[in-house]
Image (cartoon, helix red, strand yellow):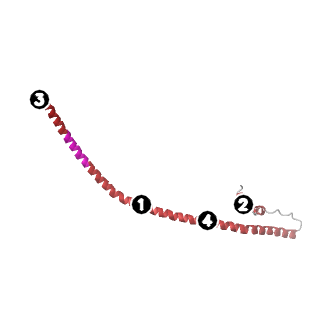
Amino acid sequence: MDAAAVVVLIAAVVASVGAVVALVAAWVLVGQVRRLERGIESLRHETLPLMQDARTAADLAATEIARVGAVLADTESVTATVDRAARATRRAFANPVVKVLAWRAGAVGGMRRLRHGDRLPERPVPVALVEARRMEGRRPEARRAVARGR
């Protein structure tokens, strides 16, 4: 055998070993791909019902949020109505109440003078009455600010 034949024989053996290694690698890869496909199918069977449940829960949450929004809008409407009614009531009764308190204070002072004459010094006007007279005619916001000391 000459050198060329030996080289060809070695090349043939190396090519055969390479082909066998390639076949084994392909066989292993095919097995891994099949195993991966089974895992994907298993995952798909598990996740599809979960996704449907998540969609159902999201739809229910959206419905509840819409209901809460409607209740909040109704509550805001009722609050605004009550505020308007309270302001109207305050405007309607503030002036007459102040006048009644002033009349009462005058009547009490007059009765005291009738009973005791000039012996007793005149009683000072109550602070609350002075404050009520001072607040008369002011807007409710200004009254609240003064009441808070601002």
Mark 3 or 1 closer to N-term?
3
Q: Residues within 10 Å of mark 2 (few under 14, many from 20)?
A: some
The answer to which of 61 and 17 lies nearer the viewer is 17
Tell me, yes or no, whether the two marked residues, 4 and 3, touch with CB atoms within 8 Å.
no
Apparent side of residue 53 relative to residue 36 in the rendered image (left or right)? right
Mark 2 or 3 closer to N-term?
3
Q: Main secondary structure of the magenta part?
A: helix
Apparent side of residue 1 relative to residue 43 in the rendered image (left or right)? left
Task: Classify mark 2: helix, strand or loop.
Answer: helix
Q: Residues within 10 Å of mark 4 (few under 14, many from 20)?
A: few
Q: Which residues are magenta?
A: 18-31
The residue at which mark 4 appears reads as 79
The residue at which mark 1 appears reads as 55
At a point 31% along the width and 56% down the height, the residue shown is 42
Q: Quadrant of residue 118?
A: bottom right
Mark 4 or 3 closer to N-term?
3
Q: How many marks?
A: 4
